[in-house]
Amino acid sequence: MCRCPAAHRVLALAGGAPCGGRRRGVGVDRTIGTGVDAARAAVVIAHHPALRAVKRGADIVGSSALIAVLLPLALIVALAIVLDSRGPVLFLQRRVGRGGVEFRLIKFRTMVRDGERALAAHVGADEGLRREWTQARKLRNDPRITRLGRFLRRFSIDELPQLLNVFIGNMSLVGPRPVPRDELAYFGDRAAQIVEVRPGLTGLWAVSGRSEISYRERVELEHRYVVEWSLRMDALILLKTIPAVVRGHGAY
C-alpha cells in the first residue's frame, strides 16, 4: 500500500480512492489489486476521446505559454552549463512513450562526459551502491553529476526542455514519468497499462516524494494515475508541482 500523504490527498480531492482502496463508478473495480482486464477497462472508460482531446489541447496551450515565459531562464541555464563543464548543453535519451513507442527525451545536461564509465567504476567498487542502483535506478551521490547539475536536478530545472516534448506530442504536462525501455521490467504487469498514456513532465509520483519512496511505490502511483485519471486530477497535480519543485524533496 502506498504511504505517500501527498498522493492520498490528490486522489481524494480528485474523487478517487486512497491507495489500496476502492472507488465507485461505472461498474469497474478500480483497486490497485485489480486484474489486467479490469484495469484496461478503467483506462478505456476514463480516457474518452473527447477528454483526451481536451487534455492534448491543454498540453499545447500550457507548454507554449511556459516555453515563452521560461525562455530567458533556459538561455541563462544553457550559458551556465557551457561555462561549468565541457560537453553539449542538451542531453537526449530514448524513453518509452505512449503505446510503447520510443522517443527522444530532452533535458539539460547535468552529467560529465564518459558518465557511464564513471558510474560502472563507482558502483562496481561498492556492494551497497550497487544495491542502491539496482533497487532505485538512481544514486543519491551520483559521480556522473556535475556541480551545476546537482543544483539543476535539485529544483528540476534540467527538465525544462521537456516542454518541447510536450508541445510536439511525445509527452503530456501530467502523466507517468517516462523511463528507458530496460527499466520497464521494474513495472511488472503494470507496464502495459502505464504505457497506454503519454508520459508526463510531472505526475502523481513526482509530487509524492519522487526518489524518497521505493520503486514499488512509484509503480503503484504511476499505475493509479492511469486507472483513476481525470482532468481534475491533472489540475491538482499541476498545482502541487510548484511547491514540490521549490522544496526539491526527493530530487537528486
Image (cartoon, helix red, strand yellow):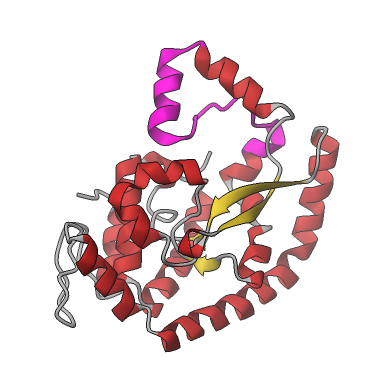
Q: Is residue 144 part of the magenta span, yes or no?
A: yes
The residue under the point 57% across, 27% down is 142
Residue 88 percent across, percent down from the top left: 80, 42
Measured along the vertical axis of the image, is residue 24 above or below residue 211?
Answer: below
- Residue 179 or residue 109, whichever sits in front: 179
Residue 34 percent across, percent down from the top left: 17, 61
**Left or right of 86: which side holds 55?**
left
- Residue 90 or residue 209, whichever sits in front: 90
Residue 85 percent across, percent down from the top left: 80, 32
The residue under the point 49% across, 64% down is 98
Q: Is residue 58 part of the magenta span, yes or no?
A: no
Measured along the vertical axis of the image, is residue 104 above or below residue 148?
Answer: below
The residue at the far bottom in this view is 50
The residue under the point 71% across, 37% down is 148
**Left or right of 154: which side holds 244?**
left
The residue under the point 71% across, 42% down is 109
**Left or right of 10: which side holds 195?**
right
The residue at the far top in this view is 125
Q: Quadrant of residue 186?
A: top left
Q: Quadrant of residue 230?
A: bottom left
Is residue 187 shown to the viewer in this render? yes
Is residue 13 shown to the viewer in this render? no
- Residue 196 or residue 13, whichever sits in front: 196
Measured along the vertical axis of the image, is residue 76 above or below residue 242?
Answer: above
Range shown magenta: 125-150
Residue 128 percent across, percent down from the top left: 40, 17
